[in-house]
Amino acid sequence: MNKLFGTDGIRGVANQYPLDAETAIKAGRAIADFFCGQTEKGRFVIGRDTRISGDMLVFAISAGICSMGHDVRIAEIIPTPGLAYLTRSGNYDAGIMISASHNPYGDNGIKLFRSDGFKLSDDDEARIEHEILESDPLYRKSRTVSRLGTIFRMDDAADRYCGFLRECMGSGFSLEGVRLVMDCAHGAASKVAPKLFRELGAQVTAICCNPNGININENCGSQHTGTLSARVVAEKVDIGLAFDGDADRLIVVDENGKSLSGDQIMAVCAKSMMERGILNNQVVVSTVMSNMGFGTALKKMGVRHIQASVGDRHVVEEMRKTGAVLGGEDSGHLIFLNSHTTGDGMLAALNLLNAVRRSNTPLSELSTIMTVYPQCLINVDVSSKPPLDQIPDLVKVISHVESKLGENGRVLVRYSGTQSQCRVMVEGPTETETRSLCEEIAWVVKKELG
């Protein structure tokens, strides 16, 4: 089991191990050695979101890479999917994104992309992790002064990414007449998203687009849609869009202010793509966290539903195996594999708006294609992560709840791959019963692991 890498790269508290400057330099060396070995001159691209700790980690990792004799291009503040695009379109050996996604500003993380724009496998991450933890031999691989790498700034990174998104939607695509409110979470999309959507013709009211280094995701973005919902209703617009800190997630609000999950967005897009004949193999991939109603909706459409492990990387792996072009997570990681290699909030928003416009139907009506089963999710802070099936009281309460639900619901208890939390999810026949049963399990988790 990896000690540093979780479900989406390395993540932790900024300026503390392993997200401290010293370890970041080691990570830079290990990344350079893994991707380039003794290649004379490799090329890497690195970007970040708006966290105050971003600069420290960008330059520490860059220093490690340069010490191994390779060059670094800094893309500055850019959404994670934008960094993935730059990596593959610019023929870089690898891309490095500094972000903790939807986490608060005090956290940060390191996400890695291969030269083809896809995230690394577990085995590849394990090899890099080993080199970080056993990094002393890497010092012997450092280059002489005359062979050190250099750092360059990329001034047009955001423009390149926006151009790519335009190409994905086609030359005739327009948002003329669309009225929307956009919440950028004071994150990486704060400049690029409002600009692009306005250039495409939409009337955009942009909120939470003033990052100061410490307000990213603070009571805003995809995790907190209350303010967005209120603005959508007050301004009587067509839709509200909420991104997370690095804009690889999308959650939307319909014209009535109701928040729609990633599952609901996928259901709407799946129907539209199937009607246009572009839902390859008529299959959609989600994760085990998807609402039971999502699978039911796909079945009614005649679409095959495949569930992968949690994490957009695992979704992408399953999509590539099955030839699926649409997949994602209920949390809002949505992947359109016919266009891009990773979850992309802005691309997902454009595809959803395309589906809404083509149907000439309000989003609130389109979303009725999926009936959402009552679901309760409680995140419990934990001090350790022993195997869940080795905690007798927890096994007992889960068995009790499952027998009580029968075929009318389900239970899923798992550790977060990015935080010190245990996620308890219960689906059931009613909101009240589902909440009560979820709290029953969460109480035991807190007692045993809190």
Image (cartoon, helix red, strand yellow):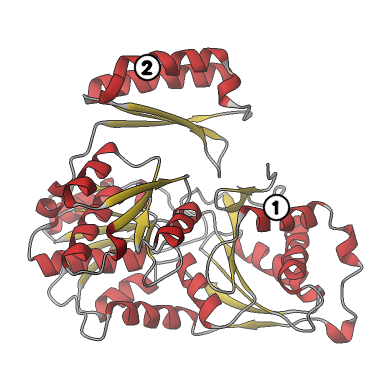
**As drawn, 240 above or below 442:** below
Q: Nearer the viewer, residue 157 or 317?
A: 317
Quadrant for the C terminus in the image: top right
Label 1 close to label 2 by CB (< 8 Å): no
Residue in view at x 31 percent, y 56 percent:
283
CA neighbours of label 1 inside 10 A, class few (<14), some (14 to 19), many (20+): some
Residue 186, above or below 64? above
Q: Amino acid at mark 2?
A: Val
* Residue 182 against residue 386 in the figure, above or below: below
**Which amino acid does the dot numbered 1 rest on?**
Ala
Q: Which mark is residue 126?
A: 1
Instruction: Look at 30% across and 19% down and name the residue there.
Output: 405
Residue 248 in view here: no
Q: Position of residue 414 (x, y in %)?
A: 50, 33
**What residue is shown at x 68% (from left), y 53% (from top)?**
19
Q: Is residue 319 left or right of residue 419?
A: left
